[in-house]
Image (tube, helix red, strand yellow):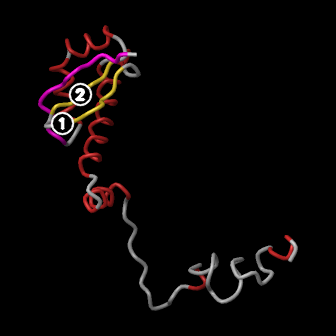
């Protein structure tokens, strides 16, 4: 059999032509008329339940807080936006890693303001910021 003979529609079992199996199965023309279409759901609504099913709630929560941190730092201290990040969330303590000592110091000096903004943005209660400097 030559490569031209293996093209879709030439009777090759995996080509999508034929008896409803393979890649062509389940297309709009093959739908069961009795089957009722499901309502669309937003991915953001499905994600928490899926994370719970797979035991990923803590990772999802950390990702939410990390995203909220990025928004807070970009709004409150734009100069530090690319120079610090949330690297951990353990027992309501957010660990922030700064690239430079001066950035870490600014985050520490403004920690009460940043913590209040983070609490307002994130859905998780964060009671403390722990700031570390990245060692290269």
Q: Which residues are magenta?
A: 124-135
Which residue is under mark 1? 90
Residue 81 in magenta stretch: no
Q: Residue at x 41, y 22 (%)?
A: 82
Q: Residue furthest top?
A: 102
Of the two numbered discs 2 and 1 on the same chain, state the one appearing first in sequence: 1
Which residue is under mark 2? 95
Q: Which quarter of the image is occupied by the N terminus?
A: bottom right
Q: Position of residue 28 (x, y in %)?
A: 58, 79
Q: Residue at x 18, y 41 (%)?
A: 124
Residue 129 in magenta stretch: yes
Q: Position of residue 72 (x, y in %)?
A: 29, 27
Few, some or many C-alpha atoms within 10 Å of disc 1 (few <14, some 14-19, many ≥20)?
Answer: few
Left or right for 80, reference 123: right
Cβ atoms at labels 2 and 1 below 8 Å apart = yes
Left or right for 92, reference 55: left
Q: Which quarter of the image is occupied by the C terminus?
A: top left
The quadrant holding residue 70 is top left
Q: Residue at x 23, y 38 (%)?
A: 122
- Above-or-below relation of 134 to 19: above
Few, some or many C-alpha atoms within 10 Å of disc 2 (few <14, some 14-19, many ≥20)?
Answer: some
Q: Position of residue 86 (x, y in %)?
A: 30, 30
- Above-or-below relation of 116 to 12: above
Q: Secondary structure at mark 1?
A: strand
């Amino acid at each position: 059999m030559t490569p031209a003979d293996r093209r879709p529609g030439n009777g090759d079992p995996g080509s999508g032509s034929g008896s409803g199996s393979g890649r062509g199965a389940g297309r709009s023309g093959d739908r069961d008329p009795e089957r009722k279409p499901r309502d669309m759901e937003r991915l953001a609504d499905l994600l928490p339940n899926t994370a719970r099913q797979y035991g990923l709630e803590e990772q999802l929560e950390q990702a939410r807080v990390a995203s909220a941190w990025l928004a807070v730092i970009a709004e409150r201290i734009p100069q530090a936006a690319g120079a610090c990040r949330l690297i951990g969330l353990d027992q309501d303590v957010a660990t922030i890693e700064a690239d430079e000592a001066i950035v870490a110091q600014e985050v520490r000096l403004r920690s009460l303001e940043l913590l209040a903004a983070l609490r307002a943005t994130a859905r998780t209660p964060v009671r403390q910021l722990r700031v570390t400097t990245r060692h290269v």
